[in-house]
Image (spheres, coloured by chain):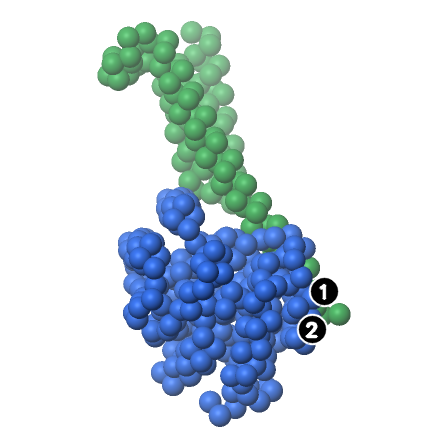
Amino acid sequence: MKKLGKKGSKIWIVIPAYNEEKVIGKVIDSLKKEGFQNILVVNDCSTDKTKEVVKNKKVKIYNHIINRGLGGALNTGISAALKNGAKIIATCDADGQHDPKDVKRTVEFLQKENLDVVIGSRLIDSKGMPFSRKAINSGASFLTKALFGVYSTDTQSGLRVFSRSAAEKINIRTNKMEVSSEIIKEIGRNKLKFKEIPIKAIYTDYSLEKGQTGGNAINIAYKLLLRRIMR
Amino acid sequence: MITEIIITFFVFLMYFKLLLDFKKNKISIKRFFFWIFIWLSLSIIVLFPGIVFFFSNLFGIERAKDLPIYISIIVLFILIFRVGMNLEKIEQEITKIVKGIALKENEK
């Protein structure tokens, strides 16, 4: 883990971003400060200045010509990281809700325990999370367990770390927010070694505005059910 | 009598075509059974028209003629559902293209 900060350590951070001009610069800076050198941003056809902000930070940027949603952006990001020779891939939200120290801890945990996937769960230690969020996330966990047989306390967490082999196996097909549950499904399907570690979520008014709302969650549940029935 | 024979013959032709398609892997097993079911029900109705009355009584439909309308509504629902599925497939295809362009652009 000493090599975390060096180039060639082959740890890549993937940040899917859509209209995040206000915070993405800070997020990149704080990750760099924590020693991550390989950062790539997938700009999901933002209509604001996200692209310019990211370019100024001198990190890799991949631009979607049409907005595809979180799933599409993660898909592109993970493929790009694999192409760049990543040994470990960490995904991180662009809205600044993840503490870069937590990202580092999650990566170290994966290396130490020799796991395939680690998800940073905001619900193991859920102090400070608004009740409505807790309720939505518990519902999602229950549904995911029922449908895909993998229990995760926080399926909707944006902080995930994959080993290279796991990232190669995980097949993302959904475009929108339901990708979070799809990743859990893929963990079950590929029988990957998976654990969660508690992380803090930094809930600012900004990140709350951008996350999942109740109506959105129902929509996701419906789509997941459809998918389960049809396959 | 002639109509019955023609339709039965037609149904057999469709079965044959289905089997060929299935062997050539042109259709999924789900679709294969779906169409077998559709053609089978058609031939049964043609050969035994009384069955329509049986079913309309069973479902408590007073006029036998209403049954096909109910069935049509159900079929329409299924079709809309399938259109939805196809749309999703197209969405996924668009994503593939967008991803391909994003990755390629970065290589330059």
Image coordinates of residue A135 in percent, x first then y, are 30, 55
**Image point (68%, 59%), residue name:** B101
Q: Mark 2 lies on which chain?
A: A
Q: Can residue A163 be seen in this view?
A: no
Whether residue A177 is situated above or below residue A2 in the rendered picture = above
Residue at the bottom extreme of this rendering: A2
Whether residue A138 is situated above or below residue A197 in the rendered picture = above
Give the residue number, with chain letter if any, for mark 2.
A56
Real-space Cα distance between discs 1 and 2?
18 Å
**Image point (31%, 68%), residue name:** A127
Residue at the front extreme of this rendering: A205
What element does badge 1 sit on? Answer: helix
Write down the quadrant of residue B37 in the picture. top left
Q: What residue type is labelled 2?
A: Asn
Mark 2 closeness class: few <14, some 14–19, many ≥20 residues within 10 Å: few
Query: Does label 2 lie on the same chain as label 1?
Result: no
Residue A89 lies left or right of residue A200; in this view the side is: right
Write down the quadrant of residue A25 in the picture. bottom right
Give the residue number, with chain letter if any, for mark 1.
B105
Write down the quadrant of residue A190 in the picture. bottom left
Q: Which chain is blue?
A: A
**Image point (37%, 73%), residue name:** A199
**Image point (67%, 76%), residue name:** A58
Q: What residue type is labelled 1?
A: Glu
Q: Which mark is residue A29?
A: none
Can you tell which of label 1 and label 2 is closer to the viewer? 2
Whether residue B58 is situated above or below residue B25 in the rendered picture = above
Q: The green chain is which one?
A: B
Q: Is residue B67 visible?
A: yes
Q: Looking at the image, which is closer to me, A42 or A208?
A: A208
What element does badge 2 sit on? Answer: helix
Image coordinates of residue B4 in percent, x first then y, are 43, 12
